Image (tube, rainbow, N blue to C red):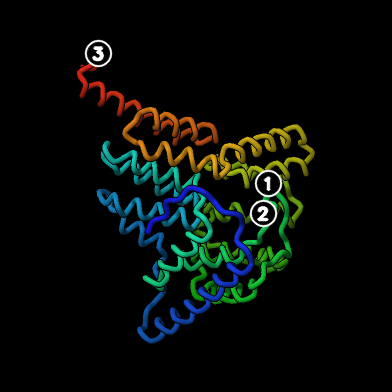
Amino acid sequence: MPATRVWVRPPVVVAVGLTIVVAIVVGGIVWRNRTQAEGIGAPTPSALAGERQARVNDHAAWLRRLDQLRVEDRPFEALKTGWAAYRSAPPGRRSEMLKALTLALLATVPEDQATTSLQRRIEAEPNDLDARVALLRRSLAVSPSPVDQPRIGRNPEGADTALQELTTLLAQFPDHPGVREAMIDASLDSGQMDQARSLLRSWPEVLKDDPRRLRLQARLDLDVEGRPDRAAEALTLLLSSTPHDWHLRARLSRALEMQGASEEARRQAQIVDQLRERLEPDRLGRRLATSLQALDDPKSLDDLANLCASVGLSKLASAWRREADSLRAAQALRDGLPGTF
């Protein structure tokens, strides 16, 4: 079932993390046995499968793809896919695409629901490499972890098993950016700096501008290399696309403070506080649930526009306002009000 809840639970406990690792390892064994027995080649990343599925008029495929990206926690890819879906949709279906994109950007999927969704995808299609990587990333998440502080050497329990699986995947699929990203993060978490540097240097040339590479380079520069100037530059570029990401903004604040730009660092820290308040899961969940259930009401679309604007997503806010204006015009035309012809 697609992920629909818009709230988030507290960080997953170690026992759940170990359960995820076991599921991944068992799935990996089954996967490798199957590929060897059936002569299956490299798995098709779900990103590529999603692009093939989401034909211009296949609205259901677009929505499924956006839901997958939400579960995988891939906001940059969700932005690219969401706007492509929006452009492809006829006027009467555009609100659905905006709804899916809004959820993908703002609504965190609860840990248990995301894990279940990813496991089901892997069971249904063992070659879904993106799902496997997303599940591994969740098992490696350090919890709790201050997002604006280094987490070098803070491996969670069960990390060694997950790292072995990632190492195997990277050897098989060195050009898959998701596998490489997870491996670099895991290397930094475990204090393997030279390995992280090497993996980042060998990032596929055709994907040098991938936001994932920029994020990792910023992390390395900020937490290891002592180059907050370069980190701030990369983080500023990333935030131009995802200004609502308070995790990245908190790191930008720290990078600026390290450079001695205290006033700008404080300003960014204040924005972080505002974003955290506006995106607080319970409050955000109630607001989204109310507005997204009434997409035939212009006032609900106005509220969604205001919400997006309040966290810096101006393009998405403008799209919601256009939909609200179109809906008002259609309702006025239908009701025969003066001045609508």
Closer to the chain start, of discs 2 and 1, is 2
Provide the residue designation for mark 3.
339
Q: Farthest residue in the right direction?
A: 260
Provide the residue designation for mark 1.
251
Provide the residue designation for mark 2.
219
142 or 313, nearer to the observer:
142
Q: Are marks 3 and 1 in contact (CB under 8 Å)?
A: no
Gap in angstroms between the C-alphas marked 2 and 3: 56 Å
- The answer to whether residue 333 is left or right of residue 247 is left
Give amino acid for label 1. Arg
The local secondary structure at tag 3 comes to loop
- The answer to whether residue 102 is left or right of residue 226 is left
Please tell me whether mark 2 or mark 3 is closer to you in this view. Answer: 3
Q: Residue at x 42, y 31 (%)?
A: 318
Residue 87 % position (x, y): 33, 41
Q: Are marks 2 and 1 in contact (CB under 8 Å)?
A: yes
Quarter of the image for the N terminus: give it: bottom left
Quarter of the image for the C terminus: give it: top left
Closer to the chain start, of discs 2 and 3, is 2
Give amino acid for label 3. Gly
Gap in angstroms between the C-alphas marked 3 and 1: 52 Å
- The answer to whether residue 122 is left or right of residue 166 is left
Please tell me whether mark 2 or mark 1 is closer to you in this view. Answer: 1
The local secondary structure at tag 2 comes to helix
326 or 112, nearer to the observer:
112
64 or 9, nearer to the observer:
9
Neighbour tally class for label 2: few under 14, some 14-19, many 20 plus, Cα within 10 Å: many
Gap in angstroms between the C-alphas marked 2 and 1: 9 Å
Q: Residue at x 54, y 55 (%)?
A: 208
The local secondary structure at tag 1 comes to helix
Q: Residue at x 56, y 64 (%)?
A: 137
Closer to the chain start, of discs 3 and 1, is 1
